[in-house]
Image (spheres, rainbow, N blue to C red):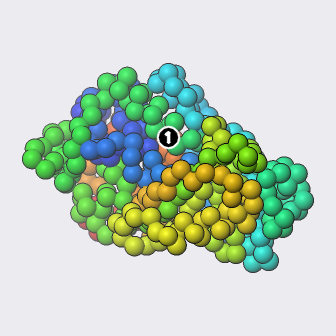
């Protein structure tokens, strides 16, 4: 712990976590600078924006489920505060999530999720294929069963990023459009200059590992390709809520947008820092989506992008002191948007010299080994 209230905080990285930390730290009275050559880009710009700790729950990841559920409960207040601070919509969607399965193995996977959640006292509603189609008529006959998860939400990631940038600017955050080379106590090293500070917060996503020895080889990029589709006049309406699930073993999700669009994702490949969209990735995403929602063939394909999820060996983020004067708030894997409220609360507590809430202990950098 630093044991003191900080004055100048430099946040390295302008994704959803970095922008949120910068905004809230400045609103709390700190002088804040944010270092990023292109804020509101990268994985946060590509993301589907699902806030789905229950739909993504899996045996053995109880700490991640607790962290995600706690953060999800804070999202409505976080979104309201963001809208007030920015004067813009937060992008939060509250319609819930439907999970589907196509073949027998897919439905067994959903049974595992449902049984696991039931064992933790978190029940979900099992649905037949007919019941799923009654709730979302765009789903096709290949969908044979699934689950209703009304508590899981979603957010329009690009609306949220625009609001976060506006809120940060309104709070007085200084934006430095350069790339950080390294972070050490008291300074962030840029290509040709140095920014001095009381505390540096590393929130640079998949690139965090190159900024400090304690994160080297402990944050790795996991590539995800995502498509954005637009409903044409002749096409059926998109789902009203997030629909997601395995399609013959491959994960697939469709997240609606208010403008009639749909975000379709996502592939998952460990190929380093490669962000090119592949023919195979596009083919698989479209084939799986058409299996689930046949009418999607009439939609326009308007964007194909790839982002790099910042991942750790246990899928938990890294939140805490790396050494005096250097904080980490990175490694959120698929949960960057979901885990933002709880991450920001923890970082602000640490900046005040306080202990964050107990559930944050699972994210402490010391669990990864290496220099601390």
In percent of width and height, residue 134 lies at 88, 51
Q: Position of residue 261 (x, y in %)?
A: 62, 44
> Residue at the left extreme?
192
| Residue found at x 55% / y 32% | 90
Pointer 1 residue: 158
**What residue appears at the point 70 percent right and 75 percent down from the top-left corner?**
248
Residue 361 x/y as whole percent: 46, 55
Q: Please say whether residue 100 is visible from this viewpoint.
A: yes
Q: Quadrant of the C terminus?
A: bottom left
- In the shown orientation, is residue 103 left or right of residue 154? right
In this view, 346 is above or below 307: above
Residue in the image at 41% along x and 28% along y:
166
Question: Between residues 372 and 17, which one lies in front from this camera angle?
Answer: 17
Is 57 in front, or is 325?
57
Q: Is residue 360 visible?
A: no
Seen in the image, is 235 located left or right of residue 22? right
Quarter holding residue 11: top left
Q: Position of residue 79 (x, y in %)?
A: 56, 32
């Amino acid at each position: 712990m630093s044991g003191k209230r900080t004055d100048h905080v430099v946040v390295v990285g302008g994704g959803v976590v970095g922008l949120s930390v910068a905004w809230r730290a400045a609103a709390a009275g700190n002088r804040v600078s944010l270092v990023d050559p292109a804020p509101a880009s990268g994985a946060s710009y590509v993301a589907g924006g699902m806030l789905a700790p229950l739909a993504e729950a899996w045996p053995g990841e109880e700490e991640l489920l607790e962290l995600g559920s706690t953060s999800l409960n804070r999202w409505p207040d976080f979104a309201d505060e963001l809208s007030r601070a920015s004067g813009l919509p937060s992008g939060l969607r509250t319609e819930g999530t439907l999970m589907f399965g196509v073949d027998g193995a897919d439905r067994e996977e959903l049974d595992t999720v449902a049984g696991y959640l039931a064992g933790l006292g978190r029940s979900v509603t099992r649905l037949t294929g007919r019941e799923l189609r009654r709730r979302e008529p765009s789903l096709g006959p290949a969908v044979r069963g699934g689950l209703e998860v009304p508590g899981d939400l979603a957010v329009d990631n690009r609306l949220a990023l625009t609001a976060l940038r506006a809120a940060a600017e309104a709070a007085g955050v200084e934006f430095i459009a350069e790339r950080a080379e390294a972070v050490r106590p008291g300074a962030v090293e840029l290509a040709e200059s140095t920014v001095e500070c009381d505390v540096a917060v590393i929130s640079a996503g998949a690139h965090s590992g190159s900024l400090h020895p304690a994160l080297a080889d402990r944050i790795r990029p996991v590539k995800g390709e995502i498509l954005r589709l637009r409903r044409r006049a002749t096409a059926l309406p998109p789902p009203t809520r997030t629909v997601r699930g395995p399609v013959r073993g491959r994960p697939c999700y469709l997240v609606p947008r208010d403008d009639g669009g749909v975000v379709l994702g996502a592939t998952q490949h460990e190929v380093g820092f490669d962000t090119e969209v592949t023919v195979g990735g596009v083919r698989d995403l479209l084939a799986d989506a058409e299996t689930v929602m046949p009418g999607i063939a009439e939609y326009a394909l308007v964007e194909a992008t790839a982002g790099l999820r910042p991942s750790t060996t246990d899928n938990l983020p890294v939140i805490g002191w790396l050494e005096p004067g250097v904080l980490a708030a990175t490694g959120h894997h698929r949960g960057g948007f979901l885990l933002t409220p709880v991450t920001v609360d923890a970082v602000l507590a640490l900046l005040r010299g306080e202990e964050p809430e107990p559930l944050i202990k699972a994210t402490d950098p010391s669990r990864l080994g290496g220099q601390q």
